[in-house]
Image: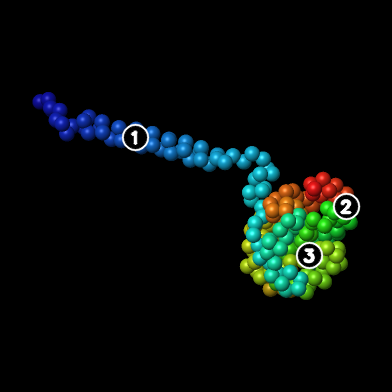
Amino acid sequence: MVKRQTPGSPERKFSLPLGLIAAIVLATVTAIWLISVMAGRPPANTAQENARALIGGPFTLIAEDNRTVTEKDFAGKYMLIYFGYTFCPDVCPTELQTMSTALDMIPQDKLDKIAPLFVTVDPERDTAPVMKQYVALFHDRLIGLTGTIEQINDMKKTYRVFAEKTEDTGASDYLVDHTSIIYLMDGNGEYLSHFSYGTTPEEMAEKLTRLIP
Ligand code: NI
């Protein structure tokens, strides 16, 4: 006996899900394409533009005289910012010395446009008086900035700085692993350039003189 095809036969039933599957596949492909197009927009044209978008922004910190300062206090100035801590045994003193020597090498009118800042990544030990005493060892223009743990954490995020205690956090003589990079921000507080560890004072002075009008 031959089984008759009925409207509810498997072949008939199968045609609808196939169309549905095709529609789902098409929708998925379209969605993936759309996402990829949107992800590529705006395109990162240069590393400079990327850095401009990622580094810098508003901040609230505490200056040497316990006064609260924000990025607005440095508006119109070229902020030369280094992150570190006063207990740092080698890298920070070296970098601050390089920065100070470079500052002494550039023309006075350009020097007047620079706000050299040393921001601590160790606010628990680097209080305002500690910072004041420390920066005085390097350059009379160098400004030491600290803050609450939260303010410093925000600042680290804003400037994409990594810093982490390396030893027993309970000990008072701990070290702090940290990014060693000097940022040069323009008069609008936007990223202009940076100096990596190992830059000589001559190279830094030359670049500062060239970049600052
Ligand atoms: Ni250091």
Question: Callout 2, which amino acid?
Answer: Pro
In primary-sequence order, the first of circles 3 and 2 is 2
Q: Do the residues labelled 1 and 2 touch (CB within 8 Å)?
A: no
> What residue is disc 3 on?
143
In primary-sequence order, the first of circles 3 and 1 is 1
Question: Callout 1, which amino acid?
Answer: Ala
Can you give x and y, in whole percent of width and height, for residue 194 in the image? 75, 50
Q: How far apart are marks 1 and 2 (CA)?
A: 68 Å
> What residue is disc 1 on?
23
Label 2 crowding class (10 Å Cα cut-off): few <14, some 14-19, many 20+? few
Pair 3/1: label in front:
3
Pair 1/2: label in front:
2
What's the residue at 34%, 34% (across, down)? 23
Specify the label residue 10 is tagged with: none
> What residue is disc 2 on?
107
Can you give x and y, in whole percent of width and height, for residue 4 in the image? 12, 27
Label 3 crowding class (10 Å Cα cut-off): few <14, some 14-19, many 20+? some
Quarter of image, res 144: bottom right
Pair 3/2: label in front:
2
Q: What element carries label 2?
A: loop
In primary-sequence order, the first of circles 1 and 2 is 1
Question: Callout 3, which amino acid?
Answer: Ile
